[in-house]
Image (cartoon, rainbow, N blue to C red):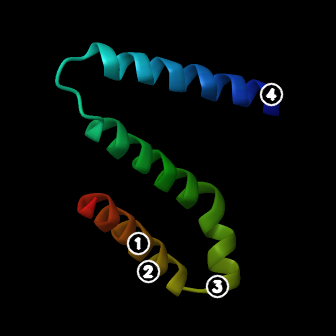
Amino acid sequence: MWALLVLASEAATAAGYLAIRLVPGANGAFLQAFTSGAMLTMLADVMMPEAFEHGGLLVGLFTALGFVFAAWISMIQ
């Protein structure tokens, strides 16, 4: 199962790389937004319930602050 997941991830990465190279004027901002949304969805669906169970209500706040910090770092580069 993990090997199949790795192969699917590699195929998606190659397809994304080719798509970004073939589209004129593409800078990757849409793909970064889509990827961060997918990551946030995965966190909310899989990891957050257990984090709330062990860490309480501050988990959501610190998750949001982490994404804000990551966005800020991305903007100052």
N-terminal of the pair, mark 4 or mark 1, is 4
Numbered disc in front, either 4 or 1: 4
Numbered label attached to residue 13: none
Within 10 Å of disc 3 (Cα), the crowding (few <14, some 14-19, many 20+) is few
Disc 4 residue type?
Answer: Ala
- Tell me if residue 14 comes above or below residue 75 in the rendering: above
Local SS, label 2 = helix
N-terminal of the pair, mark 3 or mark 4, is 4
Q: Between marks 1 and 2, how big is the CA–CA gap?
A: 5 Å
Q: Is residue 27 left or right of residue 60?
A: left
Numbered label attached to residue 3: 4
Contact check, label 1 and label 2, Cβ < 8 Å:
yes
Local SS, label 1 = helix
- Identified at 43% across, 23% down, the residue is 17
Query: Dot 1 corresponds to which residue?
Result: 64
Q: Position of residue 32 (x, y in %)?
A: 36, 43
Query: Dot 3 corresponds to which residue?
Result: 55
Disc 1 residue type?
Answer: Ala
Q: Between marks 1 and 3, how big is the CA–CA gap?
A: 15 Å
Q: Between marks 2 and 3, how big is the CA–CA gap?
A: 11 Å
Contact check, label 4 and label 1, Cβ < 8 Å:
no
Within 10 Å of disc 2 (Cα), the crowding (few <14, some 14-19, many 20+) is few
- Identified at 43% across, 43% down, the residue is 35
Question: How many labels, in total?
Answer: 4
Viewport quadrant of the C terminus: bottom left
- Identified at 24% across, 34% down, the residue is 27
N-terminal of the pair, mark 1 or mark 3, is 3
Viewport quadrant of the N terminus: top right
Numbered label attached to residue 61: 2
Q: Is residue 39 left or right of residue 25?
A: right
